[in-house]
Image (spheres, rainbow, N blue to C red):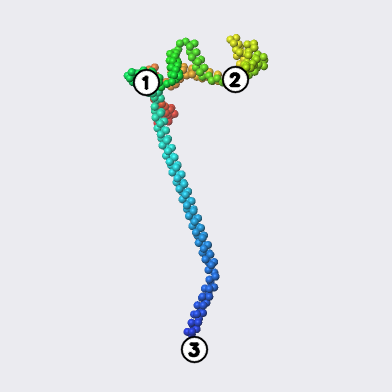
């Protein structure tokens, strides 16, 4: 019996191994239906990973774009700051040069240059045997030449008349200067004129007549509407508030000018006394004319007590 069992064992082992192989194959066959879900899961995970990578790339691109924009904006601000600094330096240099330059000296040099150019052109023209006035007149029209001659004549008369002659002549000059400064209110004049005409026509003093060409003419019946040498109607005029204020302003300005001239003649005795005699006073005034614009800040610092 043992011998039979030992003899039969190899075949049984083969059968067992064959059966186990079939069982493994059957198990594999049983597991095969679950593989599509795993594949779907893998595909889903792959898609999610690709989406995450795409979103990460997009975020990186957005961050890089914002960084480039900030860099470009910063460069633009730097360029603007540089331009503003250069412009400020140029304006500061120009302002310094303008303050350091005497305007009266510039005008004097300009006049001297114009005078020298005029004399040089005149000498060259006369050396060539030509008429200087005739040649210079070629650059101007007749109207411009006449206006210029009248202007020069008026200027010469004013230069000759600048000295004090008498109080009547001085008052006449003041009156003419005030007339040049008067600005007539034509709108108010026309309004008051029409009101006066309507009032006179209502009272029967004026008669409105229409001519053949359609023009309206006001005829004064009794001679009381238009002013004459004996008329006193101007006494009934009542100026408005603006005209009164303007008169007061003109009087105040005239008084200020008069007081300023008086102070200039007196030599500004109300200021600080910085002289010991008349000669020293004149010398100090000359120094002030040339150096006050440079020493004003220093003197103010001494007065405030902040100068060390």
Q: Secondary structure at mark 2?
A: helix
Labels 3 & 2 near each other (Cβ < 8 A): no
Q: Earlier in the sequence, mark 3 or mark 2?
A: 3
Name, please, the residue furthest toward the left. 127
Q: Earlier in the sequence, mark 1 or mark 2?
A: 1
Q: Secondary structure at mark 1?
A: helix
Say which of marks 1 and 3 sits in front.
1
Q: Residue at x 40, y 23 (%)?
A: 107
Q: Is residue 123 visible?
A: no
Labels 1 & 3 near each other (Cβ < 8 A): no
What residue does disc 3 label? 4
Given residues 172 and 195, the one toward you in this image is 195
Given residues 79 and 187, the one toward you in this image is 187
Marks 3 and 2 sit apart, C-alpha to C-alpha, by 156 Å
What residue does disc 2 label? 190
Q: Quick check: 144 above or below 26?
A: above
What residue does disc 1 label? 118
The spot of residue 149 in percent (x, y) is: 43, 17
Say which of marks 3 and 2 sits in front.
2
Q: Residues within 10 Å of mark 1 (few under 14, many from 20)?
A: few
Marks 1 and 2 sit apart, C-alpha to C-alpha, by 50 Å
The spot of residue 162 in percent (x, y) is: 44, 14
Name, please, the residue furthest toward the bottom. 1
Q: Is residue 93 left or right of residue 190?
A: left
Q: Earlier in the sequence, mark 1 or mark 3?
A: 3
Quadrant (top left/top right/bottom left/bottom right) for the C terminus: top left
The spot of residue 78 in percent (x, y) is: 43, 42
Q: Residue at x 38, y 22 (%)?
A: 114
Name, please, the residue furthest toward the right. 203
Q: Quick check: 159 above or below 20?
A: above
């Amino acid at each position: 019996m043992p011998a039979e069992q030992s003899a039969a064992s190899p075949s049984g082992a083969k059968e067992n191994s064959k059966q186990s192989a079939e069982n493994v194959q059957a198990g594999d066959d049983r597991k095969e239906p679950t593989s599509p879900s795993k594949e779907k899961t893998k595909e889903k995970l792959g898609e999610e990973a690709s989406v995450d990578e795409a979103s990460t790339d997009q975020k990186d691109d957005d961050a890089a774009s914002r960084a480039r924009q900030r860099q470009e904006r910063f460069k633009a601000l730097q360029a603007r700051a540089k331009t503003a600094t250069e412009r400020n330096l140029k304006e500061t240099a120009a302002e310094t040069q303008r303050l350091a330059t005497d305007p009266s000296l510039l005008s004097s040099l300009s006049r001297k240059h114009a005078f020298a150019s005029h004399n040089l052109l005149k000498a060259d023209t006369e050396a060539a045997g030509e008429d200087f006035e005739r040649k210079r007149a070629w650059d101007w029209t007749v109207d411009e030449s006449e206006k210029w001659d009248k202007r020069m004549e008026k200027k010469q008369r004013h230069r000759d008349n600048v000295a004090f002659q008498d109080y009547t002549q001085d008052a006449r000059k003041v009156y003419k200067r005030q007339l040049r400064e008067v600005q007539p209110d034509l709108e108010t004049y026309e309004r008051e004129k029409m009101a006066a005409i309507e009032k006179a026509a209502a009272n029967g003093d004026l008669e409105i007549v229409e001519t053949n060409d359609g023009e309206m003419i006001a005829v004064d019946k009794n001679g009381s509407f238009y002013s004459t040498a004996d008329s006193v109607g101007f006494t009934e005029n009542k100026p408005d508030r603006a005209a009164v204020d303007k008169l007061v302003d003109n009087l105040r300005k005239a008084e200020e000018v008069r007081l300023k001239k008086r102070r200039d003649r007196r030599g500004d005795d109300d200021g600080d006394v910085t002289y010991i005699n008349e000669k020293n006073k004149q010398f100090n005034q000359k120094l002030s004319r040339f150096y006050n614009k440079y020493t004003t800040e220093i003197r103010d610092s001494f007065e405030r007590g902040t100068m060390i």
